[in-house]
Amino acid sequence: MEKYTTYDQDVLVVGAGGSGLRAAISICQAGLSCGIVTKSLLGKAHTVMAEGGAAAALGNMGEPDNWKVHFKDTMKGGRFINNPRIVEIFSKEAPDRVRELEEYGAVFDRTPEGLISQRPFGGHTYRRLNHVGDRTGLELIRTLQDKVVSYKPIVYMEHTLTRLLMDGDRAVGAFGYNRQTGEFVAFRAKAIVFATGGWGRMYKFTSNSWESTGDGAGMAYEAGAELMDMEMVQFHPTGMLWPPGVRGILVTEAVRGDGGILKNNKGERFMFNPEYMPELYKGQYADTEEEGYRWLTDKVNNRRPPELLPRDVVSRAIYKEVLAGRGSEHGGIYLDVSQMGAEYIKRRLPSMWEQFYSLGGIDITKQPMEIYPTIHYTMGGIWTESETCSTSIKGLFAAGESAAGLHGANRLGGNSLTDILVFGKRAGDHAAEFAKNADFGKIDSSQIEEEANTLLAPFTNPGKENPFKLTQELQEAMQEGAMIARTEESLTKALNKVMELQERAKSIHVEGDRVYNPGWHTARDIRFMLKTSEIICRCALERKESRGAQWRLDYTDASEEWGKINLIAQRDGDAVKLIHRPVPAMAPELAAMFEEIK
């Protein structure tokens, strides 16, 4: 049996993004030993891609904002398949978590009165995005990292975990390897927090970085955890389109929040077209057509332009506009901020100006950007209990993008950063409480041996499959068949390709040894990506309606029946078992808010 090094921690946090760091703070404050495992380097989390701001109803802009309005916006944005209790907790606690971040040292932009400045964002009734220019995620990571290192947790950088270790029905550790040396490592822990982020890398064009291969969801699923709402993958309306080498890189919603407008090749501001917003005129965002039109054409404060409709609505509109032949030179749409003035742009959107200028030679103070929707976020993930963030596996907790329940069918921009703060803290608090009342479980060496053999198999496998080639074929299949517009035919074609690739993945062969071997790393990543892609396709086929990010051209309307159902995916041997579970009922006092607010 291969040698491995064992580390013991009271609580193991997997992932060093915002939710992982916030969980670690709570664990350390509880007086427990905490280990943080990150696939990359500390400070290089995908959280930095959330640039526009953190949504919380502080009400600093002279508008009647409060948690109830935030609750209503989030439920509407998620098309009511979100867990109402999770949304309630989120809306109520988000302001405290933002103020706490400020106490930790975050430097937010300010109003003339010295309050935290807030900007408008898609789907939010009021200006609610607390921001640091267009670098809010970076400031959040910097602040949380400074805070957590003061408690001196042990950080295991460049380590990949690939399997949960189980003692009966309880998670008691995890197994993986050091990415630099290839040496195997095992962690024993009384409780584990998964803060592993999303899985956008199975698509060809994505804002996600290389780490986002769904390791957390994959490990949880293989260990028996429930995954929920996996068909709901968010397509951010504005990703870079040109030049080709940067296609998919995020263009923050702050560009539109600060006044950027979308135009077609005729120079038309096409988002005013009612064809692209039928839900608005059916009462989804307004109760009457007249009110809906006022919502869009508010010339008094220009805080709610049509470009700031929820992301699923804008993404579909861009898709239709390009399909109709009114796209940009390279097959996208134009996003223009030049009318805002160079000084304003460079002050409010410094990262965007630098990104386009350095990567594409485009000066956005003078030229429009060419954009097209890009895979950005996963609303689905590991099912968690609303109060504690515990999963269906004892001793395992999850928070952030790896967890489901808050965002439903579509996430509102800015809700991700406060999500990781609110539920990162809750996951850390409750994992610490669990650990205080638990002992180290028994590590089963046969599980370690089995996983070590799985990891080492590509070196001795007589097959000839290349893991990079399989990844490329997967990305092409998912981009074509399971992106914005879906049909039974396209999803079935993508699923068949995924199943073919799963078989071929059994014959992956890599050369060299375990030291600095990216081919070997990819050989394990692709297995998680393939299973996650299978689950996405099966869930998207099962949900026969259009709702949020799930847009079926063969089932164009939202179904009242499906609006009451969350899809749960469970492992059943090698098969994926799908369960229809009723969406949790909204408490009467929460349901009454919709009438109360109106």
Image (cartoon, rainbow, N blue to C red):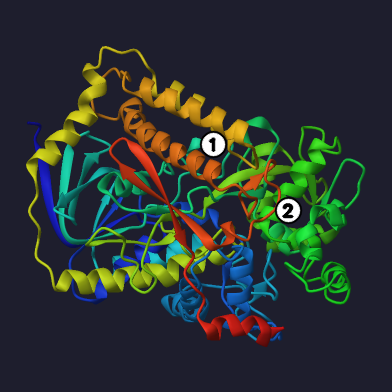
Q: Secondary structure at mark 2?
A: helix
Q: Relative to 267, is 480 on the left or the right?
A: left
Residue 212, image x and y in percent?
A: 44, 44
Q: Secondary structure at mark 1?
A: loop
Q: Is residue 478 visible?
A: yes
| Quadrant placement of the C terminus | bottom right
Count of numbered circles on the image: 2
Q: Relative to 464, is 552 on the left or the right?
A: right
- Is the residue 225 above or below the residue 132 in the image? above
Q: Which residue is mark 1?
A: 203
Say whether marks 2 and 1 touch (CB < 8 Å).
Answer: no
> Image quarter for residue 60?
bottom right
Q: CA distance from mark 2 to mark 1?
A: 20 Å
Residue sticking out furthest to the front: 561
Residue at the image position 9 percent from the left and 61 percent from the top = 440
Residue type at mark 1 is Tyr
Judging depth in this view, the residue of 444 and 254 nearest the camera is 444
Residue 356, image x and y in percent?
A: 69, 44
- Is the residue 70 above or below the residue 79 in the image? below
Residue 232, image x and y in percent?
A: 54, 51
Residue at the image position 55 percent from the left and 31 percent from the top = 492
Residue type at mark 2 is Val
**First reached walking from the N terminus: tag 2 or tag 1:** 1
Q: Residues within 10 Å of mark 2 (few under 14, many from 20)?
A: many
Q: Is residue 58 visible?
A: no
Residue 17, image x and y in percent?
A: 40, 57
- Is the residue 156 above or below the residue 92 in the image? above
- Is the residue 241 above or below the residue 110 in the image? above
Q: Which residue is mark 2?
A: 314
Q: Residues within 10 Å of mark 1 (few under 14, many from 20)?
A: many
